[in-house]
Image (spheres, coloured by chain):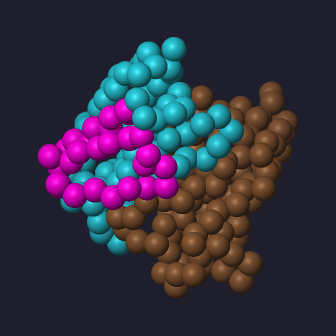
Amino acid sequence: AQKVTQAQTEISVVEKEDVTLDCVYETRDTTYYLFWYKQPPSGELVFLIRRNSFDEQNEISGRYSWNFQKSTSSFNFTITASQVVDSAVYFCALSHSGNTPLVFGKGTRLSVIA
Amino acid sequence: DGGITQSPKYLFRKEGQNVTLSCEQNLNHDAMYWYRQDPGQGLRLIYYSQIVNDFQKGDIAEGYSVSREKKESFPLTVTSAQKNPTAFYLCASSSTGMADNEQFFGPGTRLTVL
């Protein structure tokens, strides 16, 4: 069975601080995909990144970066120099192929205070 | 513009009534999904469809029904058998390719039982 754990329920930081959101996953598949989504107050989920199990390279996109480590089954997300607009709920998710459902963690609510 | 539309945005239901939530996509995606989100929870899978005229139950399918008569449409009916239907419902779609298999989400429908 697949499982995603986001142990941090809520995080609060002051603007410009760096923050890391943790994600630990469980799967027996050798091929799988990991995702991060952002859910702003409007409710719609916004896709941030996809990673397949064969690509352990870290990725940076502007202030966002992701650290994928198969050895610890983790896919952590770091926001550098956080801004108020980063306030949202962030979900980590897992799937085993292109058209199968996602298994979501329970999400981490990030509040960035000005 | 390509995307996923859900209607209505807000829906109120009396106990004992069936209601249908609409989901339409013009992304030419083969796969479509329905998820339910409760406060403080991750998203849980209700039903999904990988091809027209075929669909599979998810983890919490009891009290729900779906149809997939057209590629673009995947309506969800919340029946009176669903014991606690008040929740936020999100529809998603994805391609079946391995290179671009992220799910895109609609804006959601918030259902309240009166």
Residue A25 in sight? yes
In the rendering, at what x and y percent does residue B33 appear? 37, 50
In the rendering, at what x and y percent does residue A30 appear? 52, 85
Residue B78 belongs to magenta span: yes
Q: Main secondary structure of the magenta part?
A: loop
Give the chain ID for the brown colour.
A
Relative horizontal placement of residue B79, taking residue A62 as reference (left or right): left
What residue is drawn where x is 39% and y is 64%? A100
Q: In this picture, which residue range is highlighted in magenta? A: B52-79
In the rendering, at what x and y percent does residue A15 appear? 80, 36
Q: Quadrant of the C terminus of chain A?
A: top right
In the displayed structure, B5 sits above or below A50; it is: above
In the displayed structure, B35 sits above or below A32; it is: above
Closer to the camera in the image, B41 or A36: B41
Residue A13 belongs to magenta span: no
Relative horizontal placement of residue B34, taking residue A15 as reference (left or right): left
Q: Colour of chain B?
A: cyan
What residue is drawn where x is 58% and y is 55%? A104
In the rendering, at what x and y percent does residue A80 appear? 74, 51
Closer to the camera in the image, B97 or A30: A30
Report the number of discs.
Answer: 0
What residue is drawn where x is 54% and y is 32%? B84
Q: Quadrant of the N terminus of chain A?
A: bottom right
Residue B105 in sight? no
Residue A72 occupies quadrant: bottom right
